[in-house]
Image (cartoon, helix red, strand yellow):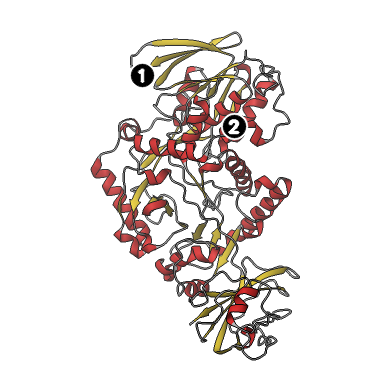
């Protein structure tokens, strides 16, 4: 018997609002056979405030509680599992400018707690390893690290943490920042690809009805449920239908639906905007970069979020960029719906004046350019991403909320602040339906998270991407905002970089772990015996590999000796503060291992974060033919 056939078909739920919360809840309920109806005033799903992060740990919010951060981490990892094709895989660099109070190292205790919790979650279920290895969750970079990275060639396809920091090292005004910088595996989240996923999954579901361009007019309470009265946005026709349960997922308009049910609930509503710009990135692939600041002041946080094809989304937490005068409003004792000023409400319902758009975009560019001077050449890349978000309760810093209930009235309200709260809300609503005996079946009790979203997860990456491209065009956004921006970051290997002068006929690449004991009578034999796949006449890197065991919690030697042979590069058994001269490899005339080099200088680049006593580290050695 299929998942849907084993679930009674007589449970009916209305979901008011088709944002990320409403869509996720609809997918969750329809998967177990609940007859779900979405009532959405707009023409498409998931078309609310800008989303650009998973928020895996709340690292963008230094002032929220550790408890919220841990909750966000779990919500985000589970969200990434149900929307795997909607993740932009790139790290985030967090900086604290000198003009801002606070020290970067104050972030460490929270980062360590989050890293430990992430490791625990990965151990619980390997599918949670969304952000790479737990040991690579965050890394610290001192100024001297950045200055050294600035000397390197900028990679077109970053593969490790150091690669990601190269454009930052070259383009950011390091004199204006406190150190260390923090690189954290905080990935991006594409609202356009989430919209595409929800649209494809729900349109194909036999258990979901989508009433788009339809406005909720009233809720009428019944003995066991509700009668939902709607108005068609195109022809004005009225219609109604009865359900066993109502889920209010109306986003910033949640209070207006509460008013229909005569429910009192305190909340804030805040209008925010992010700005789309175009910049060549100084020819680089960038991570996201955050410059912390004091919210609502001219020194407010700056956020540079990269997308393909040179598009960047900008946030500036000042009142002339992302925030607005009068843009944060609260509900009252008589009205559950906070009321935005009319001129701000019209931005959502009508649109923006071109002059204000250009002015705010220009302000956002200049705001970022205070720390990235070359960014002043950026230009407007399209209309802003904007919308209002609700914040439930009386604490405007709340970020991890998901859902609340009116038990006696068969009514729930999704109250997510961040998109990652949608799945948590969906699961709690399923539990509530069973608690109230509305939903008797426990068919999904032992399903995995992936089984609970099997229909949406069966969608192909190609289908999601094609639909997301269309949605971007329909909403007048650059298609690049719908495209993946994914370059998985790996730890920076503890490395020896060896430069030397030698004939170009030397083998350009040798397979790991075969160097020290290799003897070859000719270059050709060496290339064959050592399984090289790089042309011997190229100027490519020579790569060696070995391991060592760390003896201190932080190993950062400032100097290193010289070596006088190519294959002589071997690590010390235990690396001291300054490594010893490398041992010579076994050699005979014309052998690869005995080829001389002229004063090749070793420079150490150490694994971050700090090493643990006795930890075995894989070590790669690179040599460049000059």
Q: Residues within 10 Å of mark 1 (few under 14, many from 20)?
A: some
Tell me: 466 left or right of 405: left
Residue ID at (54%, 46%): 54
- Front residue of this view, candidates 359 and 583: 583
Residue ID at (32%, 57%): 366
Q: Is residue 207 above or below residue 20?
A: above
Q: Position of residue 429 (x, y in %)?
A: 62, 26
- Which-is-in-front pick, marks 1 and 2? 1
Quarter occupied by the N terminus: top right
**Quarter assignment of residue 341:** top left
Residue reaching furthest to the right: 614
Q: Which mark is residue 115?
A: none
Whether residue 258 is visible: yes
Q: Is residue 524 above or below residue 269?
A: below
Give the SS element for disc 2.
helix
Residue ID at (38%, 50%): 318
Q: Which mark is residue 425?
A: 2
Q: Position of residue 166 (x, y in %)?
A: 47, 67
Q: Is residue 488 above or below residue 200?
A: below
The residue under label 1 is: 233
Residue reaching furthest to the left: 355
- Front residue of this view, candidates 133 and 351: 133
């Amino acid at each position: 018997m299929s998942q849907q056939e084993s679930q009674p078909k007589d449970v009916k739920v209305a979901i008011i609002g088709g944002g990320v919360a409403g869509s996720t809840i609809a997918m969750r309920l329809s998967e177990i056979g609940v007859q779900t109806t979405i009532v959405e005033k707009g023409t498409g799903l998931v078309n609310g405030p800008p989303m650009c992060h998973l928020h895996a740990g709340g690292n963008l919010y230094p002032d929220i509680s550790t408890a919220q951060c841990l909750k966000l981490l779990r919500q985000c990892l589970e969200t990434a599992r149900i929307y795997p094709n909607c993740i932009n895989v790139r790290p985030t660099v967090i900086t604290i400018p000198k003009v801002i109070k606070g020290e970067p190292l104050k972030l460490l205790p929270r980062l360590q707690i989050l890293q430990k919790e992430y490791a625990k979650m990965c151990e619980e279920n390997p599918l949670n390893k969304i952000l790479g290895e737990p040991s690579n969750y965050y890394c610290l970079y001192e100024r001297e690290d950045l200055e050294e990275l600035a000397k390197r060639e900028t990679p077109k396809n970053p593969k490790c943490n150091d690669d990601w920091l190269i454009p930052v090292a070259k383009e950011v005004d390091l004199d204006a920042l406190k150190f260390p910088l923090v690189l954290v595996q905080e990935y991006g989240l594409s609202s356009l690809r989430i919209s595409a996923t929800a649209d494809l999954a729900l349109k194909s579901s036999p258990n979901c009805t989508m009433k788009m361009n339809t406005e909720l007019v009233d809720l009428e309470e019944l003995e066991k449920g509700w009668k939902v009265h709607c108005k068609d946005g195109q022809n004005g026709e009225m219609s109604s239908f009865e359900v066993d349960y109502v889920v209010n997922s109306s986003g910033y308009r949640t209070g207006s639906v509460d008013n229909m049910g005569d429910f009192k609930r305190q909340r804030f509503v805040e209008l925010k905007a992010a700005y789309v710009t175009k910049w060549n990135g100084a020819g680089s692939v960038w991570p996201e970069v955050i410059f912390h600041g004091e919210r609502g002041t001219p020194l407010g946080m700056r956020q540079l979020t990269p997308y393909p094809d040179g598009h960047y989304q900008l946030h500036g937490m000042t009142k002339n960029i992302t925030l607005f005068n009068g843009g944060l409003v609260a509900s009252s004792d008589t009205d559950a719906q906070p009321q935005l000023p009319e001129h701000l409400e019209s931005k959502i319902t009508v649109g923006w004046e071109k002059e204000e758009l250009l002015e705010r975009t220009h302000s956002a560019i200049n705001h970022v350019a205070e720390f990235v001077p070359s960014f002043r050449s950026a230009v407007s890349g399209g209309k802003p991403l904007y919308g209002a978000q609700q914040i439930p309760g009386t604490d405007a810093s709340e970020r991890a909320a998901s859902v609340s209930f009116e038990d006696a009235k068969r009514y729930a309200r999704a109250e997510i602040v961040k998109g990652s709260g949608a799945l948590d809300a969906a699961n709690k609503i399923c539990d509530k339906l069973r608690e109230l005996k509305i939903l008797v079946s426990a068919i999904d009790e032992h399903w995995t998270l992936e089984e609970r979203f099997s229909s949406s997860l069966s969608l192909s990456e190609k289908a999601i991407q094609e639909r997301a491209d269309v949605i971007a065009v329909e909403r007048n956004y650059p298609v690049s905002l719908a495209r993946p921006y994914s370059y998985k970051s790996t730890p920076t290997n503890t490395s020896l970089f060896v430069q030397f002068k030698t004939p170009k006929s030397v083998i350009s690449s040798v397979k790991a772990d075969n160097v020290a004991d290799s003897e070859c009578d000719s270059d050709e034999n060496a290339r064959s015996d050592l399984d090289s796949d790089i042309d011997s006449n190229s100027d490519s890197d020579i790569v060696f590999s070995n391991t060592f065991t760390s003896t201190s919690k932080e190993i950062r030697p400032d100097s290193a000796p010289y070596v006088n042979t190519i294959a002589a590069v071997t690590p010390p058994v235990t690396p001291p503060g300054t490594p010893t001269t490398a041992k010579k490899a076994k050699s005979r005339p014309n052998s690869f291992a005995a080829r001389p080099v002229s004063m090749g200088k070793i420079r150490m680049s150490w694994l971050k974060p700090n090493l643990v006593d006795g930890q075995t580290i894989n070590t790669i050695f690179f040599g460049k033919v000059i």
